Image (spheres, coloured by chain):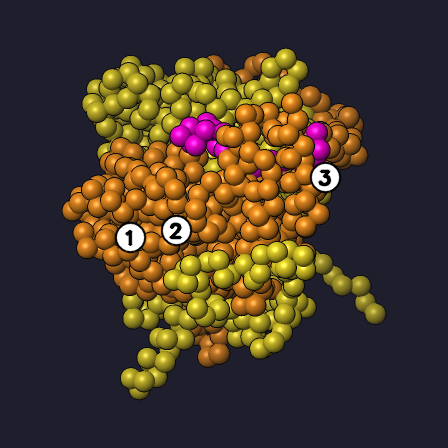
Amino acid sequence: MINHKKNAHPYIPNTAPSVQAEMLKEIGVESIDKLFDGIPDELHFKGEMDIPKALTEFELRRHMEGLLNKNKSSNEYINFLGAGCWQHFVPAVCDEVNQRSEFLTAYAGEPYEDHGRYQALFEYQSLVAELVDMDVVNVPTFDWGQAAATSIRMAARMTGRSEVLLPKTIATDRYKIIKNYCSPDIECRLVDYDEESGQLSIEDLEEKISTKTAAVYIENPSFLGFIETQGQEISDIAQQFGAISVVGVDPSSLGVLAPPAHYGADIVCGELQPLGMHMNYGGGQAGFIATRDEEKFIQEFPSRLFGIVPTIVEGEYGFGDVAYERTSFALREKGKESVGTQTALWGITAGVYLSLLGPEGMHELGQTILQKSQYTIQQLDKVQGVQSSRFKATSFKEFVVDFNQTGKTVEEIHNKLLDNEIFGGKDLSKDFPELGQCALYCVTEVHSKEDIDKLVSSIKEVVESE
Amino acid sequence: MKQIVRDHKVRDFNQAKWDEPIILELHQPGERGVIIPEAEEMIVESVGDGISQVPKNMRRKKKPDLPEISQARVLRHYVRLSQETLGSDFNVEIGQGTCTMKYIPKINELLVRTQKLTEIHPLQNVNSVQGILEIIYKLDLCMREISGMDYFSFQPSGGTQALFAMASLVRAYHNENGEGTQRDEIITTIFSHPSQAATAAVKGYKIITLHPDKDGFPDLDALKEVVSERTAGFVVANPEDTGIYNPRIKEFTKVVHEAGGLCYYDQANANGLLGITRAKEAGFDMCFFNLHKTFAAPHMCGGPATGALGVGEKLKEFLPGPIVEFEDGKYTLNDQLEHSIGMVRSYHGVPQTMVRAYAWIRALGADGLKDVAKVAVLNNNYLYHKITQIRGASAPYVKGKRLEQVRYSWEQLANETGVTTEDVGRRMTDFAHHYWTSHHPYIVPQPFTLEPTESYSKADLDEYIAALTQISNEAYENPETVKNAPYNSVIHKLDEQDYLDDPDKWSISWRSYLKKVKMEEGVK
């Protein structure tokens, strides 16, 4: 415990009484308490905060590590959970860069003393731009959900319309974010999917789309893992009605899958977490939005967009905010939505990741994931009663495993898997009741054949037991 | 060799300048930064190349134009860029007022790097994440003590998102009471953060902005004039960016409550208030704290972060879920809040920030938290006393004490020398300092906003004051020195306007820059 009477607190230099006295003398005030005179007596908190006494650094470390050690990590267990936050290999250089105290402790400095921060974020924009094959990428927003919600609001402003169509296969959580962000003025309507393939029902889309539609939003790969193959057709239909085609994407797929700009997307958004961020119990999420370099799009971004600028000295690049006057920093409620602290450090990290992987690495990443997930599907299908891919469509890294024929619930099966130190995939029975007892499994480059075989044998053991 | 005399006032500083190319210029065909684990042979034998199964129209035809760079070169590039960034570990970080740039304890960084945090998935069975849930729950308990609120959600991941969540709660609350359509106005003040007004507008509210009275206080009479049956909510910071505490805040919240509105308190920065005064006693229904400001989590170039949102009992069921609860000796997640607004961010927010904030609170204890407020206010009043003695500088509005920060003005300096606050800001970088003006619009002419927090010693404050004093002297003696600054920073003065606001010239990515440069050359 820290004895406040005896020691100055290590984090607070001016707790030393002699310095305090000197400063008070300079100000001409008798005591520190007098500095709070402006707060009326009735508002002074007179109680004691029920917060334990201060710990020394040594005690703090022991206490905190004791708590954190109660967690079971995905390094101890084999993890097949994905559903928007995915376990990937994180190169050490990503951690090295984002732990640099210069980046870790910087905030909102100017383009001079924070030149490195501006350049790193400009480079992140430039690298993601190559991955999605579009010219404009924003400084990252909170997560995929926010990126999608903002993309939809951008589309609504561009079209002057107030309805958006989304796939019924969207993640429940992401949909909650979008719905709250779009209410009260934008109506969200869900478009049905084909029961067999999971693909968006074109029939239902054609029925629901109209000249009120601001945007048609789809995801690729879909939340349920399968690849949506009708991208071009969907974009064409959207554009026929004057709506904006918005596609949400998992960027770890873009080394092998066509980027949405190649099948007609006007706005592309997605999740940066797979590009070098640890899962961090969900703290690694970060969203991005990309568009073509057209003023009508750029003027609708709420986010900061860093641009390259000359300085008064030949041979120097500087950076600054493009079209700053559109932001809420400049215009308060008349700006485009709002801007503030979001996930800049994860943007820088995603840039580091893409620089390390390069074109070959991104391709190999996608290929390995496809192979390992296809292998898992193939092996799981051999288990009696388990249908390893509920939808007849190619999936990327996630797929819906159907346990309906096993006579057991996902919860029962997954509880047993925990005994074998396996985290089964996300239980879909609550969010997608029409699927019954299904779960969304995620396999990435981090899963070895041994891990996958252990999953398969464990599931076999559970479903075949009485 | 003589001992160096240290009585000079300003730092003899040169920031690192590495002249690093844009990373895409480092492309060297064939180089690799890292190798991805491949599928084992037996897997490949079973499924083939994986890609053939993807329908042809969905395959990427040409690999992305990412650069190929060796690992060491990527690392060197980024550590050089890091050296061109003035993190708060490196400077007397008092120039970014409103941001509460305080010491970031290294022990907390060590704690969040454990695989027991980094490698846990947000949907893991709660039995396997009891440690992090306990930390979040106990942080909630501490926040309740600090604010007087009854429940916290840590899902909002920044101050702006917390403000947006609060505006969403206001809407959900009135909808539930059948007054959602009628109550369509939110009242705020001009000295509050722009996100207060901006986020309420996203939720479809009409914004009413109060201006200060002659002493800088929000105007109570003006509030009384604008409240009505249309008032949905009132959002304010106290103190505002001026550091002036509004002593009549309880009357403000009373007026709004009598009109049927909710009051929400922007405590993004609560550094002068810990243990001194609380949201509850001032009559607020909700408040939020930025854990990356008052609670010493790092700012990370602008997030990830946390805006911890606290509410009184009557608003609990409207919170974004899930929230952490403690039942029968076990920590659980409650996502069954009856009137929940849904979610504002995926999963549980940014747990790393919560771990840091909890560790910081435990390192200080109740007494230490109060010391934070006291010393932050002492430091600020010392700075205020000294800055207002600098030629050309002033602190508009009420004379007397301020809490944790002050918005100053160089109006006199600008009138007398032509040197603007932006000029001063650039010159400050030559002495290793950050400097921030104000949000827009500039109500205080030629503004600058300083917030010294509890983290800096008297000697640190004196260094910052000396730099501003020297720049004031330069402005009066040789204003061009200030106007053409910086000289010792990473780059020189930007030559910016066309390149940021002209669609034919702006470049938001390197590929776009290359296209536009080519076009420009073609024209020539």
Residue occupying the point 41% across, 56% down: A138
Give the extent of the magenta segment: A419-440
Q: CA distance from mark 1 to mark 2?
A: 10 Å
Tag 1 residue: A234
Q: Is residue B410 visible?
A: no
Tell me which chain the residue with mark 1 is part of. Answer: A
Front residue of B139 and A402: A402
Q: Residue furthest bottom?
A: B524
Which chain is yellow in the rendering? B
Kindly identify the amino acid type of the residue bearing the numbered disc 3. Answer: Glu
Tag 3 residue: A76
Determine the colour of chain A: orange
Kindly identify the amino acid type of the residue bearing the numbered disc 1. Answer: Ile
Left-right relation of A283 to A131 = right
Q: Comparing marks 3 and 2, which lies closer to the viewer? A: 2
Kindly identify the amino acid type of the residue bearing the numbered disc 2. Answer: Glu
Is residue B418 magenta-colored? Answer: no
Residue A465 point in image, percent of width and height = 66, 26
Provide the secondary structure element on which disc 1 rests: helix
Provide the secondary structure element on which disc 2 rests: loop
Residue A84 point in image, percent of width and height = 50, 42
Neighbor class of circle 3 (other Cα within 10 Å; few <14, some 14-19, many 20+) is some
Residue occupying the point 35% across, 30% down: B167
Circles 1 and 2, Cβ within 8 Å, touching? The answer is yes
Question: Is label 1 on the same chain as label 3?
Answer: yes
Is residue A438 magenta-colored? Answer: yes
Tell me which chain the residue with mark 2 is part of. Answer: A
Tag 2 residue: A228
Q: Is residue B67 visible?
A: yes
Q: Earlier in the sequence, mark 1 or mark 3?
A: 3
